[in-house]
């Protein structure tokens, strides 16, 4: 049997900042990177949803992305989150 060399971890884990420990996620938004310039519009839509909601934004012309996000949405629903699907053209992306 071959012996595997395990090298020590090169990163040192420290205590996270207190502000990070106190932070709580209110809502989750999963959007394509091309929509990042529209964060102000997305924040307005996301903040109107109840706490713990998930917004899944996808490009209408990309069916593969839509199918993937539908499966992600089903997983979130199984864990008790409210899920909203938002096509990119409804979010103001052209």
Image (cartoon, rainbow, N blue to C red):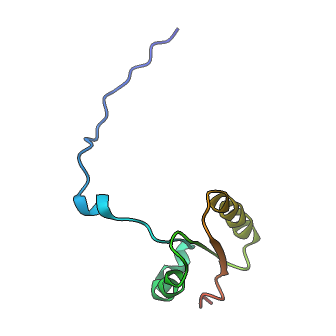
Residue drawn at x 30%, y 29% as measured from the top left: 8
Q: Is residue 60 above or below residue 90?
A: above
* Residue 4 pos. (x, y %): 44, 18
Residue drawn at x 67%, y 81% as measured from the top left: 87
Q: Is residue 83 above or below residue 94?
A: above
Q: Is residue 9 above or below residue 18?
A: above
**Viewer-closest of 35 and 86:** 86
* Residue 42 pos. (x, y %): 52, 84
* Rendered-image quadrant of the C terminus: bottom right
Residue drawn at x 64%, y 83% as measured from the top left: 88
Tell me if 44 is positioned left or right of 68 in this view. Answer: left
Tell me if 84 is positioned left or right of 64 in this view. Answer: left
Residue drawn at x 23%, y 45% as measured from the top left: 14
Count of numbered badges drawn on the protein: 0
**Viewer-closest of 74 and 50:** 50
Location of residue 76 by image quarter: bottom right
**Viewer-closest of 77 and 4:** 77
Q: Is residue 16 above or below residue 1?
A: below
Location of residue 84 by image quarter: bottom right
* Residue 32 pos. (x, y %): 57, 73
């Amino acid at each position: 049997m071959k012996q595997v060399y395990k090298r020590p971890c090169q990163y040192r884990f420290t205590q996270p900042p207190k502000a990070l420990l106190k932070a709580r996620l209110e809502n989750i938004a999963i959007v394509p990177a091309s929509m990042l310039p529209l964060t102000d519009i997305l924040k307005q839509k996301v903040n109107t949803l109840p706490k713990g909601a998930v917004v899944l934004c996808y490009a209408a012309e990309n069916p593969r992305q839509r199918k993937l996000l539908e499966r992600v949405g089903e997983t979130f629903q199984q864990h008790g989150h409210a899920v909203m699907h938002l096509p990119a053209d409804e979010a103001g992306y052209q």
